[in-house]
Image (spheres, helix red, strand yellow):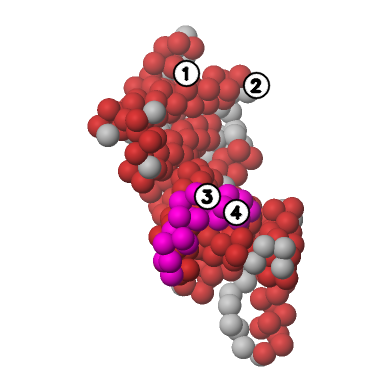
Amino acid sequence: MGRYAGKRIVQGIITVWFIATATFFAMHAVPGDPLSGEKAMTEQIQSNLKAKYGLDQPLMTQYAIYLANIARGDFGISFTQENRSVNDIIKEHFPVSATLGILAIFFAGLGGVLWGALTALYRNRLPDTIIMFLVILGISVPSFVIAALGQLSIVNLNDLTGISWLPIGGWGTVWHMIVPSLVLGLSTMAYLTRLMRSSMLEIVSADFVRTARSKGLPPTQIFTRHQLRNAILPVITVLGPSIAAITTGGFVVEIIFAIPGLGRYFVQAVQQLDYTVIMGTTVFYGGFLVIMVILVDLIYGLIDPRVRLE
């Protein structure tokens, strides 16, 4: 297991290096000067920033300084937000995005396993038809449409009852998190439902399931210990990337529901051409995704020893 884990970690480090390198050269390919923005800078400030990031040096020297700063965990200082470093922005706003993402993946994972198992058990019957129709809607409809419909439903519910059951935006309480997390996790829930259904249908006709039935084991025990445990393996495989994708991909949901998450600042950085924030958050998101994939690989190796041996 140690060799397997070490191999995955080395692969993860190489992947993060590739993401950082691609981000660096992509940002330097964008036309314009990163220090020329709407906010006026004195010559002294510009010279200090050029010295810190090596902007007056050859490209490969800048690249070496960039990698050295990343290795120390220093993503730089924002060019548009006064006296704020990229590290401070990440520390302050990523916990908001992470909280929203964790709730979304909880709803998505729980719903995906539950609905997928139900559709497999009631294959080609009414529950299967209804759930799969909703799954197609969840995959097809964009998140911003679902978010807008969610807000409209909250407004209508509050007006109809005369009571403010749920807030339509903002952040701070559990009630602010419910609808955005459901909206954010809906498409992932639909995907996991289809994956769980396909996996369950394969397991139902497996030899070890027929053997368990021939031994007279209770149907509940066959379902929980044999069918569900083996069918959930593909779901676990995609759960790590799904966690990272949900946690880092809620940009639209954060903007619509006025949530002060990191995605909102990333969008603002792109609009304002804040190069350090763009590069810092991109590398941070990429590293987070790699870590999630490695963790899932290790968990998968613990569950299924064949993965480690191969």
Which quadrant: the N terminus? top left
* Spot occupied by residue 74 in the image (x, y as percentages of width and height): 35, 33
Point 72% across, 80% down: residue: 156
Tell whether position 220 is magenta.
Answer: no
- What residue sits right under mark 3 in the picture? 206
Mark 1 surroundings within 10 Å by alpha-carbon count, few (fewer than 14), some (14 through 19), many (20 or more): many
Q: Is residue 101 visible?
A: no
Instruction: Count the numbered circles shown.
Output: 4
Q: Which residues are magenta?
A: 194-218
Residue matched to label 1:
55
Q: Earlier in the sequence, mark 3 or mark 4?
A: 4
Which residue corresponds to the image point at 52% horizontal and 39% vertical from the top-left? 80
Amino acid type, residue under disc 2 in the picture: Pro
The residue wearing badge 4 is: 201
Q: Nearer the viewer, residue 53 or 300?
A: 300
Kind of residue at badge 1: Leu
* SS at badge 2: loop
* Disc 3 from disc 1: Cα separation: 62 Å
Tell me the distance, in whole angstroms, between the alpha carbons under discs 2 and 4. 53 Å
Our reading of the magenta stretch's main secondary structure is: helix
Dot 3: element: loop
Crowding at dot 2, Cα within 10 Å, few <14 / some 14-19 / many 20+, comes out as: few
- For mark 2, what is the residue? 31
Q: Secondary structure at mark 4?
A: helix
Q: Is residue 163 visible?
A: yes
Label 3: few (<14), some (14–19) or many (≥20) C-alpha neighbours in 10 Å: few
Looking at this view, name the residue that lies furthest to the bottom. Answer: 162
Q: Is residue 291 above or below residue 108?
A: above
Q: Position of residue 83 (x, y in %)?
A: 41, 42
**Residue type, numbered disc 4:** Leu
Which numbered disc flags the more N-terminal residue, 2 or 4?
Answer: 2
Q: Earlier in the sequence, mark 1 or mark 4?
A: 1
